[in-house]
Each structure stands twice: as structure tokens, then as C-alpha cells.
Amino acid sequence: MRAPRDLFRPAPPRALGALASLAILATLAMAGATGCVSSQDIAGLRTQIGDVQRSVEQAQSQASSKQDVAQLDAQMGRQMESLLKTEADMQVRLQNLASRIEELQAKLEDTNYRLSQLSQQIATTNQELKSFHAPAVAEGTAPIAPPAAASAPAGVVDPKALYEAAYNDYLKGNYDLSMREFQEYLANFPDTDLSDNATYWIGETFYRQRKFRQAIEQYDLVMSRYPRGDKLASAQLKKAYAFLELGERSQGIGLLRQVVRQHPTSDEANLARGRLRELGVDVK
């Protein structure tokens, strides 16, 4: 018959110390009963008991220390895991924040560009309006009587008045009327300083009406007919936008990069960079 397995388990250090003390005391009792115990024997046994107790206390201290170290290691592991998770969450939040900042910057650049265009257009309009004003009469001098008005020949069109009317209609959202007026301007005055502007604004009327193919054709005319005009970069940029609106991503990206390369310090280049970042592609 086998003995139960629990009987062979090692006893804990405290139990071992107690057993050792009991064994020594039993020895003392037996020796006392037989009358063979001397004071020297008792002193030796007491020394052995002290050694056993110190060994037991040391074993208990070591066991307690190991347990504390294990608990400390587990706690440090949990804290490190929590810190790593927090760091990962912060990285995700920072990435999202950076993307949002880029989107807002692109929108701000687009707004600045539009304001710059509007300011330029206002300045041009004011300059054109000044040409219609008669020169001021010096104070203290009698006004000079104007010459007799002569009737204008039939079919003669004032270029500045026509351009101004076309542009004002564009600002009011009368795109069809504005387009016809700009086309009339180009038919009568194809080689003035404002001819490239008129061609560009025809493209803009198409763009505003989401007729992107027609808008692209007009932007191409600006680039081919007026390669040194001040609307070249704007035409390239808006042509890129039109391709993106049509879903032709590769053509749009190529034109945006072209704007950055050819006009690196312009407002159009800043807008192109912002749009490329929104698309998630490299500027180069």
C-alpha cells in the first residue's frame, strides 16, 4: 500500500525549524531519562538549536525577498505595458492632428489665393475705371469746354467697357452672359494686355458651371497663346483641379507638380503643394 503523496511533500522552512527543535528536545529528554546528559551536551544542543533557527529565519527571509521581487517585476511589467499603449495612442493622435493641420493649411492657402486674385482684379478694375474719368480741373481756373460730341461709328466697341462688363457679370454669377462678353472682347481685341485674362475667365465660367472639359480647353488656350502672360500659372493650376474633378488623378497630379517646378515661389505653387499633400503624394 503506497503512502499518500502529501506525506512526501517538503515541509516549509518554519515547519522544518519546529521539527528540528522538537527532535533536539526529544534527544535531551531521552538523555535525561538515562542519566547520560552533561551540561556540556546541553550547551552544544542549544547551540545547534540556535543554528537551526537562524538557518530557518534566513530561508524565510530569502523566500519573502523572492516573492517581493516577483511581485515588483509583475507590477513593472504592467506599468510598462500601459506606458507603451499610451505612447501608441499618442502617436496616432499626433498623426491625426498633423493631417488635420495640413488640410487646414491647404484650405487657408486656397483662401489666400482667392483673396489675392480678387484683390488683383479689384485693382485692375479700379485702374480701368480711372481711364474713364476726365482729368481734374485746377482750382481757380475756368473749366475748358469739351469739344462737340461726335457720334461713334456703328459697330465700334470700347474694349475697356466691354471687359469691365464681362468681368462684372462673372462676379455676379451671370456666367453665360459673361462668357459671351469675354468672347466678344477676344473677337474684337485678341492681342491686348487683357486678352489672356479674358481667355482665362472664359475657362473659369466653364469651371464654375462644372463643365470641366471645356474649362480645360480654355486653360490650354491661355498656355499656348499667352505663354508669357500673368495667367499662365493660374491656368495650369486650374487645369490640374479640373482633371482631379473629372477623376483623372494622374494628369492632375502631374500638372500640380509642374506648377511647383515652374513657379516655385508663386501662390499657385503653394496651393499645388497643399493639394498634393491632401492627395497623399510626394511633391516631387
Image (tube, helix red, strand yellow):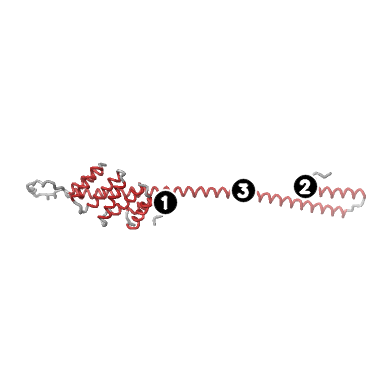
Three-letter amino acid code at disc 3? Gln
Who is closer to the viewer here, 260 or 124? 260
For image coordinates 66% across by 50% down, the residue present is 70
Question: Any mark on residue 75, and which?
Answer: 3
Looking at the rendered image, the disc whose residue lies closer to the viewer, 1 or 2, is 1
Q: CA distance from mark 3 to mark 2?
A: 31 Å
Res 142 seen here: no
Q: Is residue 192 left or right of residue 148?
A: right
**Disc 3 vs disc 1: Cβ atoms closer than 8 Å?**
no
The residue type indicated by label 2 comes to Arg
- Mark 2 lies on a secondary structure that is loop
Q: Residue visible at 42% across and 51% down?
A: 280
Residue 82: where, in percent of width, then height? Answer: 56, 47
User: Along the polypeptide, which appears first: circle 3 or circle 1?
Assistant: 3
Query: Helix or strand or loop: what does disc 1 sit on?
Result: loop
What kind of residue is marked 1?
A: Gly
Task: Report x, y in % for residue 210.
Answer: 31, 44
Q: Residues within 10 Å of mark 1 (few under 14, many from 20)?
A: few
Pick out the residue farthest to the right.
Answer: 34
Residue at mark 2: 9
Residue 136 horizontal/vertical position (percent): 14, 49
Give neighbour class at mark 3: few <14, some 14-19, many 20+ (Cα, 10 Å): few
Quarter of the image that includes the C terminus? bottom left
For the N terminus, the image quarter is top right
Position in image of residue 14 (x %, y %)? 76, 47
**What residue did someone put label 1 on?**
280
